[in-house]
Amino acid sequence: MFERYLILGVRSIILALAVIWSAFPIFMVVSSSFKTPIDIFAFPPKFLAFTPTLENYRMLFRAWPQFVEGLWNSLIVTVGATVLTAVVSLAAGYAYSRFKSRWLTLSAFSMIFLRMLPPVVVTIPLFPVVNQFRLNDTHALLILLYAAFFVSLSTWILKTFIDQIPRELEEAAEVEGATLFQRLTRIILPLSVHGMVAACVFVVVFAWNEYMFALIFTSSEAKTAPLVLAEITGTLEGVQWGVLFAAASVQLAPILVFVLIVQKYIVIGLTAGAVKG
Amino acid sequence: MRSTTRSAVRSVAAVVASSVVMGLGVTPASAETLTVVGHRVHQTTMTGDTGGDFAAEWANRHGASVEWLTFDVAGIHDRLYREASLSSTAVNVGFAANLYFTPEFDRMFLPLNDLLAEHPIEAFDELPAGMLDAMTIDGKLYGIPFRHATAALHVNTAILADLGLEVPTTFEEVLEVARAATHQRDDGASVFGLVLDERAPTHITDIARAQSNGDFLTPDFDLRANSPEMIAAVQTVKDLFEEGVLPDNFLNFQTEDAITLMQQGRGVMAISPFGRNRNFNNPAESLFAGDIISIPVPASATLEGFDAAPVRTEFWAMFIPQNSANHELSWDFIRNAMTVENTIRGALNGNGPVRPSAYDDPRMAELIAYAEAEQAVLAVARPPLPGWRNSARVIDIFKEEMDLLLLGMKTAEEAMQSVQDRVTPLLPN
């Protein structure tokens, strides 16, 4: 009995430490966004004993209108990249799952190989090409880039899911006259939605927070929120920490809510195919 | 089966295409748009409220518009160099800091001598010769200095008064006061007598110049890391660190830390650009707003010919990429930003004006308490390092050796000799 309680206690402590380790920085950022600049770095630190203020948020939206534009751009790029990745990955995952050939296997492993390259290796040589095609500073370019980097992972996740869908279901539909597109959208898609969501989570989190591609390939029209965040760190007044924390909180909120909503799919997606039954 | 496959491919292609098209629709800049790459600070100084938006006034006169592409410091140079290396670019004017100005600029940026001769900048002779020299390669001028940041000594007079200490007038007194002012507050917080922004050669050179007008690297690339002046300077920093006069996290210190310490009253004095006076005295952020004065860094009593130490001044200049269109319009934008009146207006918007006469304007004196002091320092200050391809690597090497010194793993002589040996091969031939 004692041993059981001991194990439970140790587990609880480890869990609590892990939660604190993960959540404390978020707590600091969010709580600091409601502090006056003087309170943010007060000594001794004021974790809870401070008078909350919305001034940092007022200042953010008044002095940094481009942050709102950046959020909008981030949203367009994130949705676009996610949709594109989902569509391409579903089609590719289906092909890799249902058809067998040497070339398909080669292309599947090529995708993994390309994914292993550091993004910067691909990025810099792309700049003159992108410039030549006048794709610089467009949402479309970021959508394509982000999707390109996640199609491989998403394809493999979806392939694993589609592998588990009985072929008989498709064959029955085919006998009834269903086209390939109908089988893909009415049978494969609904049955692999967990994998689709799991794959999309990775794209959403990456596209929403990505900095390097956006820095290199955007200027003003498609400038995303992380770039504006970086700019807030250097103004005439030095770093406006309160404003920065407010911006970071606004940037963080949607992705946090999204991940909390779909977290169960992440687990399902990551463990798919782990146990064959 | 072939038809169904084709229809599936068509459908997928349609969805993919619509996803991509959803992101299109960006209108390319019009011919009348002047695109400027810089920091938001540059934009603010040309478009601020106090001095007015003289960039917009210029644009209205020309029926043009100014598009600002602003990035953080590294991003500015990255974007500017990349754009300037293409066959053509939409960027018309770019800002670059003096340390980033390298001999390779002659391949990417337009020499401005002809434009200057044809359409001169008002009172051009007034611009500091040292800054112009630093922007010149083989007699060709590539950049027009616009904004400077020159080091000052910021002193928290309230803490000094509490401790019964006087504002120092020589560099020896700076060190004495820093030592005397280092203490522990009643709430347990450590108060540091002196704060330096970081341990880079750009900043340590301030100490060498205040003590003995020493230099780490001269404009003609004479490396003096192992000179007695530099060894004495790093030894001073080491002593201050060991005695707890410098912050205990100095090995990992950045400008933002220096600002925070001064605002919280945990730093008594700081060697930092004059412009920081605004931060230190900002009532919304500082516990000592109004108590922190900014004065020239006093020179050593033994340094003849200097009241104010010849500390570092770093500056930003404007450049025109060779591969850009409409060079005349770009040049006119630069000329407009550099008129005597607009230099003052920019200063009122928060800029460090490169024209010494700007400090004589009564509007400046009224708004900026340290205007006279900054003018005095600007007369003797000089850039800490020349810019060249390897300057960033050299700064890293210097920091590494400073860390070994501060951690007690090397003596000042050993650390600086090592810097000398490691940096020598990196110098231009």
Image (cartoon, grey):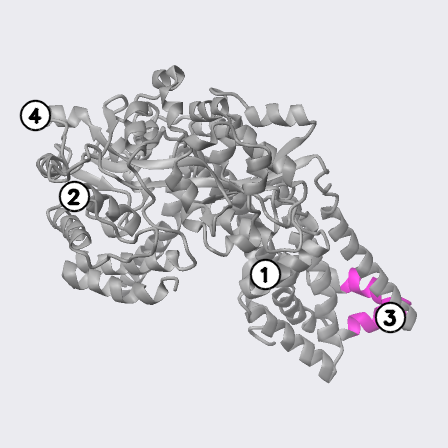
Image coordinates of residue A79 in percent, x first then y, are: 66, 49
Residue B207 percent location from the top left of the image: 20, 44
In the picture provided, is A251 more to the left or to the right than B9?
left
Q: Which mark is residue A174?
A: 3
Find the distance from the CA under tag 1 to the CA under tag 2.
Answer: 47 Å
CB atoms of marks 3 and 4 within 8 Å? no
Q: Amino acid at mark 3?
A: Glu
Read off the magenta span: A168-187
Report the residue marked by disc 4.
B164
Do callouts 1 and 4 mark residues in contact (Cβ within 8 Å)? no
Crowdedness near tag 4: few (<14), some (14–19) or many (≥20) residues, C-alpha within 10 Å:
few
> The residue tagged with tag 1: helix, strand or loop?
helix
* A232 part of magenta stretch: no
- Neighbourhood count class around disc 2 (C-alpha, 10 Å): few under 14, some 14–19, many 20 upward: many
Dot 4: element = loop
Q: Badges 3 and 1: C-beta atoms under 8 Å apart?
A: no
Q: CA distance from mark 3 to mark 4?
A: 93 Å
Q: Which residue is mark 2?
A: B211
Q: Secondary structure at mark 2?
A: helix
